[in-house]
Amino acid sequence: AVWVSEIMLQQTQVATVIDYYNRWMQKWPTLQALAQASLEEVNELWAGLGYYSRGKRLQEAARKVVSELAGQMPRTAEDLQKLLPGVGRYTAGAIASISYGQATGVVDGNVIRVLCRLRCIGADSSSLAVIERLWDMANALVDRSRPGDFNQALMELGATVCVPKAPLCGECPVKQHCRARRRKLFGKPAPVPDVEDCGVGSCPLCPPAAEPWDSSLGVTNFPRKAAKKQPRAARTATCVLERRGCHGAPEYLIVQRPSSGLLAGLWEFPSLPLAQGLQEEKQREVLADHLRAWTGRPVVAGGLRFIGEVVHIFSHIHQTYVVYSLPLDGDVTLDPALSPSRWVTEKEFHASAVSTAMKKVL
Ligand code: SF4
């Protein structure tokens, strides 16, 4: 349960996760049950939660525990990280401390913020030097008798008190230890306590000389982050092919994406990445060609109805779907040589392993 929740909570808000977590635990309450699930079932339950490789790896890891590790979960952070697909340093530390009581720290976004403020660490908090130092600190600080509670408390402190924009320093239980707060109150750096803590010259933990303390920011001077990379812009033409089903209700053609890469194994309307700057007329032509392959019949570019554009932000891609629709008469024989495809009603569509972006498209 701890493992599932930790994986679901990566990059995802608690409020979003709760329903997925409850359904998942009800469906697969044990590792054995999860090991027997199909990837399709996993993707269906995960649909809408994003970062789909997480579900896939969770299931691969469950299979590994059952088939290669005699059903026994590894019990230390080192083994968890080494042996289980999808379990990184943070998740390994969280599972080992919360589930198995190992006195090992965790460093997540909340912990980075709290520790950088506590110790006035102003260098880029995503740099290797800072991250390694934060792990050392987390491992040194963790309560030996209640490591799971301590780690959760530290993360909760970051989530509720030492929040990014307006931290509640007056109510903070560790305020007397906080160097950022001391600096804000007394307007000067804390006395240098130790050469090792605050090296002279090119300290890899101090703010760069070009960006000194900004008094208008107070404690939120920390942590510092390198400028975020702008997401890459991409355009994809997608077509909702529609036919009348047996009871006259509309049905839509969905096709399966490749088993690796972005949205691996998920279902979508037939789609085609578009080259930058392609004219509308040309877009229709390439899409019509693509649809011809799916439907096995000629598709006239002029018959495609332009519906509009849907923008969806993936972590690193600013994706614009250029949406067309095309009603089809009569039966359509799908070519089995292509990726799997099927016709679905609207209800079936929503129960399928489709991404949030495709739901917006529909
Ligand atoms: Fe964060 Fe303020 Fe507490 Fe320091 S005193 S840890 S800045 S909430």
Image (tube, helix red, strand yellow):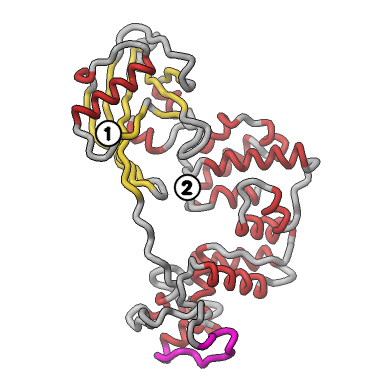
Which residue is denoted by mark 2 in the rendering? 16
Q: The residue under label 2 is which amino acid type? A: Thr
Q: Quadrant of residue 154?
A: bottom right
**Magenta residue span:** 185-200
Q: Is mark 1 within 8 Å of ligand 1?
A: no
The residues bearing labels 2 and 1 have C-alpha atoms spaced at a distance of 28 Å
The furthest residue to the top: 330
Q: Residues within 10 Å of mark 1 (few under 14, many from 20)?
A: many
Which mark is first along the chain, 1 or 2? 2
Q: Position of residue 307 (x, y in %)?
A: 23, 29
Q: Position of residue 109 (x, y in %)?
A: 51, 63
Q: The residue under label 1 is which amino acid type? A: Val
Which residue is denoted by mark 1 in the rendering? 322
Q: Going 24% across and 29% down the picture, which residue do you hit? A: 283
Numbered disc 2: secondary structure: helix
Q: Say if the magenta span includes residue 186.
A: yes
- In the displayed structure, would residue 330 be above or below residue 216? above
